[in-house]
Amino acid sequence: MPVFTEAAHTAEFILSEANGHRSRESGTLASGQDLAAGTVLQDNGAGKLVAFDADTNTAGDLVDEAVGILLAAGDASDGDIEVAYIARDAEVNLKLLTYPAETTAGGQEADTIASLKLLGIIARD
């Protein structure tokens, strides 16, 4: 019998958000990105969104902070696309987010949670 794997649903990771659409923003997903709903995002320095990398400098501080979480899957393989994302004031399910995997040095999950917290986005287990 075949096994089916279901992709993340649009906004499935949201536990609560601010009234109306106050938690949401729209932006441009940079060309070459094919991301699932719930992917933590950062600005690529040119005003476009890319997957959060949690890179740190020699002092251990994040090079780029998270700017939000992708609301629905976005495939920008063939060029930039417009997307919606959670940018502030929300509670989200950490288990349904996509963010950098822990390296041997560690800290990626903690850095991701801390960066989201600066936006008022609380990641719950």
Image: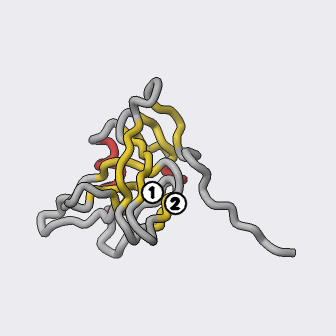
Q: Residue furthest top?
A: 19
Q: Toward the viewer: 83 or 105?
A: 83
Question: What numbered label is drawn on residue 39?
Answer: 1
Q: Position of residue 108 (x, y in %)?
A: 34, 62
Q: Circles 2 and 1: CB distance less than 8 Å?
A: yes
Q: Position of residue 100 (x, y in %)?
A: 39, 65
Q: Residues within 10 Å of mark 1 (few under 14, many from 20)?
A: many
Q: Which residue is mark 2?
A: 36
**Where on the picture, by quarter, is residue 30?**
bottom left
Residue 1 sits above or below residue 11 on the image: below
Q: What whole-number distance in Å separates the C-alpha atoms at marks 2 and 1?
A: 6 Å
Q: Position of residue 34 (x, y in %)?
A: 47, 67
Q: Residue furthest right?
A: 1
The residue that appears at 38% across and 33% down in the rendered structure is 89
The residue that appears at 43% across and 51% down in the rendered structure is 83
Q: Toward the viewer: 105 or 88?
A: 88
